Image (cartoon, rainbow, N blue to C red):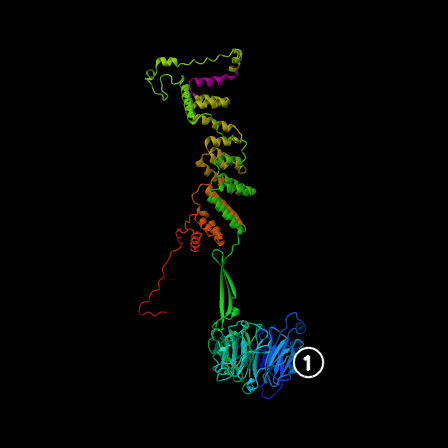
Amino acid sequence: MASLKEAHRSAALAFSPNASYLAAGTVAGAIDMSFSTTSTLEVFKLDFSSSSHELPLAGQAVNAPERFHRLSWNAFALGSPEQEKFPHGLIAGGLADGSIALWDAQQILRGRPESAQLAKETKHHGAVKGLAFNQLSPNLLASGGADGDIIIWDVANPRKPTAFPPLKSRGPSQGAGSEIANIAWNRKVQHILASCTVGGSVTVWDLKKQQPVLNIRDSSGRLRRCSSMQWHPTLSTLLMVACEDDMSPVIQLWDLRSAAAMTPARELLGHNKGVLAMSWSGHDAGLLLSSAKDHRTVLWDVASGEVLGEVPAGDSWDFDVLWSPNNPGVFATSSYGTGEGSSGKLRVCSLASFGASPTTETVNDDFSMTSAPAGPATPLKRAPAWLKRPAGVAFGFGNRLVSFKNTSRQGQAGEHVDAGIVTLSHVATESELIGRSEAFEQAMNENALAQFCDYKVANSDGEDQETWFYLRILFEAEPKRHLLENLGFHDALPPEPQAEPSSLSSVDAAAQSLEDAHLHNASLAGGDGFGDGLSPHGEDNGDFFEQQDDGDFFDNLQPSAAPTPEKPRSEQAEPPSPAVMRGLQEEAGESEATIERALYIGNYTAAVDACIKANRMADALLIADLAGRDELMRVQQMYMKKQPSPYMRVVKAIQGNDFVRLVKERPLDQWKETLAVLCSHSNSDEFQGLCDALARRLSGGGLTHAATLCWICAAKVDQALHVWTKELLSKQASVSELQELMERAVVLTQGGGQPQASPALGDLVAQYSTILASQGRMHLAWDYLHMVADNGNVALLELRERIYNTGSADIPQDAPPPVLPYQQESVVAQTPPAGIDNY
């Protein structure tokens, strides 16, 4: 057997319940070559960190009054008075002379053998082969002897243990077959005890009633010479019994609820000779160890009755086997010695021993033994429970949380059945995001994005507030006027036109306007009404006099308005005197004469040049207007060159419609004034391009926020989104900041009049929709994903497909299935041609 640790002993075993120690007492019925009858009690330390293969002794060995049939080790409750006195518990031994003895484990560990033994009591007639501490009440110790009596001991005062009246396991007609072979306390009910005899009877005792409550007998007679018993670790009504008879090497599982039928619930068949010992794992109720006279130690799957593993056969059988209560997967065995000079072995093993390769031993020239593997290792058929997940969780798409919990229950036949519970739930971690996204979706559905912008302006400050104000302008009826007001020119703007109330009806108002137009045309023609025989349309109306009746005409004449009286001469402006006129003409000099001569003959260009030469720019502008637009523009350019005022650059740009140069030359810190000029004087077709050019220049100069505002005015979603996204990626962005960015992008898209969001928004929408889907808002994520044209965006297409296949009730029933961004291939297995081997 591949062991972790070992010692050359033939000993009864007991593990410490709360520490890594193993107690070993010299077993009764085994002698060495010297026929020694001495007996010792030793405690070994389980130090698996040491590379030594030998079990190290802890403390000092203690001489025992007699050899052992059974050992048992208890641990008092933490904090109890007994635990303070005996922190490592008590070790009890069932001796061959019918007595029981108690030792203080701490004194043994401290190397004080002389003070270790606390008591030795003799109540039985014959060897004590049954001995066990109660795990639920550690002060209770049960012992069973060859006389068939079972005695309960109270070891609260271990120096003077108290013995209760014995329980008689045999009646008047029973003989030697009533010898107690083993006893076991129920692991769940503290007053239930089971005992078995070498005659094959199994009795369940109720200590409250001080009498047996159930006697188990196999109707088939297979249960003979019981050797060991074990209660189920968790189910109180299941009891395992082993038979030592070579003719019936069986292990039977009994369900006490149906024991009256005298048929076991299950039988474990696999040993060829009588079973000597067994142990049921406290860490995995599905694992049972048994050792038998066939030199085999077998690991069983209790639920299926299948052999999971087997330790290779040795020279002698293991008469004792025991699971460690502290170290899952660790167990100890003890065997008798065989052959000349051979002694028994105490081995500490693990589950890896069952999967180890078989070995062969070779005798060397110096008579030493060499072991070598003889074949491949065979792993266990199933993993133990402590290696299985008792529970687990996993997140799925949409923040769905699936959890499982493994439990066990007792089957109808009393078997241990594994069961699992799977729970599916949804976890919402971003409650604020859900509220904001739903409010934003409501604003979009109700066409209330302008009101949404007002809310954002009122609840933000700084650059964020300014950004939302510019976004709000996109929804105004007169966006340019509101832009100029925001740029600081509200005091320079003309008042908004207001409709004057009119007392005339709509028909009368139309007639009045038509009459006013006729009178205006007539005045332009130099006559009254339609004079000179012209119709209102300017055509000769020869039938005019024929259409009028002279009598009616004179009858309808109205007295003409009185002529406007002339002002008195005293009120009229008097012309300059001749002397003044002669002075002005002398001052004008030769330039005046040159200008006059040019004007007399219509040479306006010469007249303009003379005015400019005489520095009379106002006269030059007036005369150039007579010459035509080209001449006027020439004079204006010359005038602006002579004027050093900064605003003349603005006038020049407006006059020449050269706003591109204005954008390139204006100082960056005066971007608001530049934007005001563009807003007031450029046409709608050029405005967006000019704003984009101004924004690019601002961005290159480091004025990122100003550039973003200009891009908002230009409705350039891609450029503004690039700036916002770059700012977001430069720090550890929160979900709230992503929501803010998404709101800006969508408002800019719809406020700018774009029918569909820009493809550059695709990655942002995919990220945002993923978060919405993770919060269970599938319909919101679905709506956002359809705002953007996919244009081959794999993230968008994948997310659409995943949301569609969730089967969410929020997805429209008539929604067509989205197309995956991958090419689907049909994979079909083909039969190889004849003559070609499959491999």
| Residue 819 image point, x, y percent | 39, 53
Magenta stretch: helix, strand or loop mostly: helix
Of 452 and 694, the residue lying toward us: 452
Q: Is residue 498 left or right of residue 824?
A: right
| Residue 815 image point, x, y percent | 40, 51
Of 476 and 169, the residue lying toward us: 169
Magenta highlight range: 586-603
Q: How many marks?
A: 1
Task: State the residue at coordinates (49%, 74%).
Answer: 302
Residue 746 belongs to the span the image colors magenta: no
Q: Which amino acid does label 1 sit on?
A: Glu
| Residue 12 image point, x, y percent | 58, 81
| Label 1: few (<14), some (14–19) or many (≥20) C-alpha neighbours in 10 Å | few
| Residue 241 image point, x, y percent | 52, 79
Query: In the rendered view, would you say 584 is above or below 721?
Result: above
Residue ID for mark 1:
114
Picture quadrant where residue 829 is located: bottom left
Is any part of residue 485 visible from this angle? yes
Of 70 and 37, the residue lying toward us: 70
* Disc 1 element: helix
Query: In the rendered view, would you say 343 is above or below 483?
Result: below
Residue 596 belongs to the span the image colors magenta: yes
Q: In this view, does 57 lie to the left or right of 517?
A: right
